[in-house]
């Protein structure tokens, strides 16, 4: 033969010798309790052999390519196309080798982030195979249609999906009457003044031959605590549904957050303080009471609110808000004089801010019909945000991971401290005063 293969055989023999030598070194590695112990000499010898093995292998590959080209050059004219293709493959760049789907997944940065599954966590994002990953076979390309025409739908064509109509939401909240305040504590401790005897008086400089004594006033305090409470609820959803319907994801988030707001208003007003409930203002001992029937003849519900506001003023706290049920606010807005003229609703009808006796009004179903609350919100009571309302998503719940389901959780933490109960007046619309 025209090509001298003796050198090729020598290199192949040297390669086998080096590989056998490295195998012997590797067999002598000590393994104790899962830890491999290698001496410095062993590591150096092993590394030298590996370097030689790579160099010899490169030389062998080069000689084999030269042999193919030499054979093609010595062949007579008209040699088979297969031989020409073999020579071309020896010198031409290799065509790209496509990976399998499994190999692409293992080589992905997302999988490597898990360190072979040792992290015990979810992949940071779904891994999407591309056409180049799987040899252009179209694993990620959809068919023209996804169901046979014999089912539903029974014909080709696109589908137009109309927007989802969500339920209306309350626009007014009791929280809006409070100034914003945050805390990093788990419990709010404060002192509540339960009594004040004011003996301030005019005092003369002397009483006979002695300096006059000044009168003493007295105040009574009691220590109170307002623990931070958690309001939360969740909804389950399929991952594919949320991925395919972004609008649905938005609706779930918004509805869960809205549900927290509804519960928050109820807790602020009438939480009973038991278990994990807040102690609402209406359930706090020491607030004042006023009944509609106690008023003067022909007093309306609006009159009752004004008389209750007077009680708050007399406690030296200017009322900053009125909370009413929509049905009671309707009665007040629709009240007319003898000539059929509206009494209090003119500014509201023209788009003004709902106010009654210069006090902002929040009409909400969170308060019981026939009951109203007048008081100094933010002064007589304070709302604290420990963690504002937020949305979290996880698949680590029960068997949700294997079912491709996720949990959407809405949660917030807050505390309510009613520091001066006398600043609030509970109004009861029991009956109109008798004429």
Image (cartoon, grey):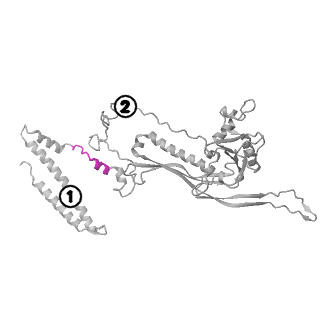
Q: Number of marks in the image? A: 2
Residue 177 picture quarter: top right
Asked whether residue 102 is drawn in magenta, I would say yes
Asked if residue 44 shows in the view, the reply is yes
x, y (%) of residue 313? 75, 48
The image position of residue 191, as x and y in percent, is 68, 59
Asked if residue 339 is positioned above or below residue 276 in the image, the reply reads: above
Spatial separation of the CA atoms under disc 2 and disc 1: 61 Å
SS of the residue under disc 1: helix
Residue 153 in picture, x, y percent from top left? 34, 33
- Answer with the quarter of the image where residue 306 lies: top right
Q: Tell me the element at label 2.
A: loop
Report the residue that reaches farthest toward the front: 434
Of the two numbered discs 2 and 1 on the same chain, state the one appearing first in sequence.
Answer: 1
| Residue in front for this viewpoint, 23 or 341 | 341
Nearer to us in this view, 356 or 125: 356
Bin the neighbour count of mark 2 within 10 Å (Cα to Cα): few under 14, some 14-19, many 20 and up. few
Mark 2 vs mark 1, foreground winner is 2
The percent position of residue 214, horizontal first and vertical second, equals: 85, 61
- Graded by Cα atoms within 10 Å as few (under 14), some (14 to 19) or many (20 or more), the crowding at tag 1 reads some
Which stretch appears magenta?
A: 93-107
Along the line of sight, which residue is nearer the eye, 300 or 187?
300
Residue for badge 2: 158
Q: Which residue is painted at 70% across and 46% down in the image?
A: 427
- Tell me what residue is drawn at x 72 percent, y 58 percent: 194
Q: What label does residue 53 carry, if any?
A: 1
194 vs 67, left or right, is right
């Amino acid at each position: 033969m025209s090509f001298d293969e003796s050198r090729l055989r020598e290199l192949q023999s040297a390669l086998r010798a080096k590989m056998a030598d490295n195998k012997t070194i590797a067999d002598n590695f000590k393994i104790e309790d899962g830890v491999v112990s290698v001496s410095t000499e062993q590591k150096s010898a092993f590394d030298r052999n590996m370097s030689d093995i790579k160099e010899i292998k490169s030389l062998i590959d080069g000689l084999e390519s030269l042999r193919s080209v030499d054979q093609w050059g010595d062949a007579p004219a008209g040699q088979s196309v297969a031989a020409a293709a073999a020579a071309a493959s020896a010198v031409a760049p290799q065509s790209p080798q496509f990976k399998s789907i499994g190999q692409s997944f293992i080589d992905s940065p997302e999988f490597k982030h898990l360190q072979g599954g040792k992290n015990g966590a979810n992949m940071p994002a779904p891994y999407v195979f591309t056409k180049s990953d799987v040899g252009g076979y179209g694993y990620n390309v959809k068919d023209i249609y996804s169901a046979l025409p014999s089912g539903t739908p029974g014909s080709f064509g696109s589908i137009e999906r109309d927007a989802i109509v969500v339920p209306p939401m309350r626009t007014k909240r009791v929280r809006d009457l409070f100034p914003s305040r945050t805390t990093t504590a788990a419990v709010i401790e404060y002192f509540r003044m339960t009594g004040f005897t004011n003996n301030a008086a005019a005092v003369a400089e002397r009483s006979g031959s002695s300096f006059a004594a000044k009168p003493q006033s007295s105040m009574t305090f009691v220590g109170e605590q307002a623990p931070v409470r958690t309001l939360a609820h969740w909804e389950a959803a399929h991952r594919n549904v949320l991925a395919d319907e972004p609008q649905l994801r938005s609706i779930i988030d918004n509805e869960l957050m809205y549900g927290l707001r509804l519960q928050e208003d109820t807790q602020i007003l009438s939480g009973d303080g038991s278990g994990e409930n807040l102690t609402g203002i209406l359930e706090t001992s020491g607030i004042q009471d006023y009944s509609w029937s106690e008023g003067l003849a022909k007093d309306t519900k609006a009159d009752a609110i004004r008389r209750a506001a007077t009680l708050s003023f007399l406690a030296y706290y200017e009322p900053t808000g009125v909370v009413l049920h929509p049905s009671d606010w309707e009665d007040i807005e629709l009240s007319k004089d003898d000539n059929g003229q509206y009494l209090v609703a003119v500014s509201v009808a023209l788009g003004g801010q709902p106010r009654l006796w210069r006090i902002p009004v929040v009409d909400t179903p969170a308060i019981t019909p026939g009951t109203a609350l007048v008081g100094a919100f933010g002064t007589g009571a304070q709302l604290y945000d420990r963690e504002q309302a937020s949305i979290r998503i996880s698949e680590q719940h029960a068997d949700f991971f294997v079912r491709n389901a996720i949990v959407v959780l809405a949660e917030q933490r807050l505390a309510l401290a009613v520091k001066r109960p006398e600043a609030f007046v509970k109004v009861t619309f029991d009956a109109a005063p008798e004429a």
